Image: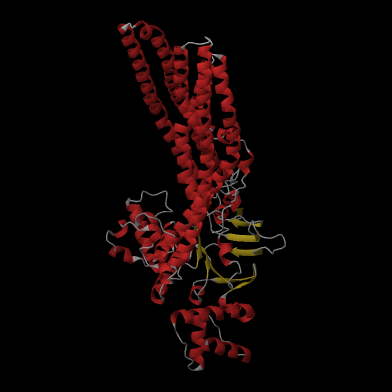
Amino acid sequence: MSSSPSSSNSSPSSSLSTPAALWRLKPFVKPVIWRLAGGALSALAAAVMALMIPIVLEQIIRGPVQTGAIDAIVWGALAVFGLALGEALMVWLRRQFVLNPATQVEYKMRTELYSRLQTLPVAFHDRWQSGQLLSRMMQDIGLIRRWLAFGLVLLVVNVLTIIIGAVLLFRWHWLLGTIFIVTAIPLWIQGYLFEKRYGALTRRSQDQAGDLATSVEESVHGIRVLKAFGRGKHALRRFSRQAETLRETEMSKAGAISSIWFWLDLMPQIAFGLSLMSGIWLISQGAIELPELFAFFAMATVLRWPIESIGFLFSFMLDARTATDRVFDIYAETNTITDPEHPTHIESPRGELAFDGAHFRYQDAGAHERDLLDGIDLVLRPGETMALVGLTGSGKTTLTTLPTRLYDVTGGRVTLDGVDVRDLPLAELRQHIAMAFEDATLFSASVRENVLLGRADLDVHSEEAERVLREALDVAQASFVDSLPEGVETIIGEEGLSLSGGQRQRLALARSVAANPKVLVLDDPLSALDVDTEALVEEALRHVLSDTTALIVAHRPSTVALADRVALLEAGRVTAVGTHSELLKSSSHYRHVISSLEAEEAARTGAIPVIRDEQDEIEDAVRKGIRKETSDDEDLFIEKEVQR
């Protein structure tokens, strides 16, 4: 799969300011905004209590300590203890307020993103790496939740604490307060520069983490291939390069954070030193008293953590902003395959499938490239089975994706019983038309659930579901499921890799049959079956297809034998339609395609046809898809094909 559009640092969201980017979370946060506000108020109350302690200490030193009134000192100590206890209680209350709402936001974002991924067209998934989607689903949304529960609340409260504390510092002397304000200016300048650098690094880091996740996923899914070809070390080297690139980016992030921390540590120390010298001078001038200087430093100490935390919370906010950008990159994707605004319904479909001047080209195709499907005109009559044949690259598989709107035509139309498939609700369309792919995909669920996936109308454990399940398994010759540890209740491993290729294909075929569609589109679903099993499946399919319209991509001559008619696809166009015998007579390209299929089949099975007498040769040729005619040219053609 090609790299996602988001793997670069450019993003439609990158032009937004950080507040505007984070404001997009409002629809998810709105239902729990009062709980988060309660958490913020609790945190602010804790901060105010902490700021009151220096003021109380000033009064204790000014009064009871200087006068030696022990009782007053005890009451002062109890007051400080009460404020500290109240601060701890408010911190606990903050956590109680914010933790549950933040997890609700995470749940809502995650489920909505998953729903979005399910509704976006196949073209979107063609462009995006699965690892990029996975990292957004798990890491980025989790980071947003942590920021809402911790980073956002503390950032707001600590900024307010610094402002309130700075104002209180002026309570003792304007010079001390001014020193505090002036020494904070470099922090804001460095913070501005930090945002620009760190934001770009964070986006790069998270995208690289998504690429790394993709590599892990591909290696795990392709572990059999890597082991079979002894390419484990090659995969490791590739992974190591990506991991090293991510490490370098993380080191750059660490450098940016260490730079801001340098200023966050340095400036408070400078402020303390200047304040101490100024305070001593002010005392010598009689401008302030010792208790006031003591209270000032106690207040500055309380403010030290909020000041130092700003750098961490600021970087946390930028991480959350980048995570938000990455998630909303998916939300911003346009879903081009949707239900029609004014849908049409087909109550009793007959099963006539037609391609009317159908064109198709991929979004990334060049302006001067020919359409992959270049004006397809083809009609499948109700109940008819049509084989679709053509050389590799002629567009057969692409054509099969159009009836169910996995892709939409870029010109012309596809109709079901005369109704454009784009005018039908998607759920109804995919109830009438089912597909089976050559690359059979199964899910980590029971055999029963996999086969009955397309029957949302049935309770999978009902008697009717059991009947449908057994009939579908019989058609697909999938009796092997009874020998599995728990029969049809056996949980299939990830993507069905615990089964053989032929077993996966039979279950996928059974799934399509169980859907009971009016139109069945099969993209060479029997390629992994042995000859004997294929013959049994084809015989069972003849009965299933007797009243079902079927479009079958034929990669084997034996598949052609299932069809009532054959359509020849050549360079994105249907150049001939007719029975097998008719096309053998009239189309040299069809004869070439059939001979190619024969050669591939002979190579696959190791079979070597033997020429007997002329009558046997004719019968073999007809059975295998090569019709012998009486002309010398046809005799020569058949002889060559049989010898192949």
* Picture quadrant of residue 442: bottom left
Residue 51 image position (x, y, % from top left) = 45, 18
Residue furthest right as drawn:
368
Q: Is residue 227 left or right of residue 623?
A: left
Residue 200 image position (x, y, % from top left) = 58, 44
The tally of labels here is 0
The answer, for residue 94, to whether it is visible in the render is: yes
Residue 600 image position (x, y, % from top left) = 51, 79
The answer to whether 494 is drawn above or below residue 587 in the figure is: above
Residue furthest front as drawn:
284
In front: 397, or 155? 155
What residue is shown at x 58% (from left), y 63% (from top)? 398
In front: 24, or 394? 24
What residue is shown at x 27% (from left), y 61% (from top)? 485
The answer to whether 600 is drawn above or below residue 320 in the figure is: below
State the quadrant of the N terminus.
bottom right
* Picture quadrant of residue 447: bottom left
Residue furthest bottom as drawn:
613
In front: 249, or 367? 249
The answer, for residue 172, to whether it is visible in the render is: no
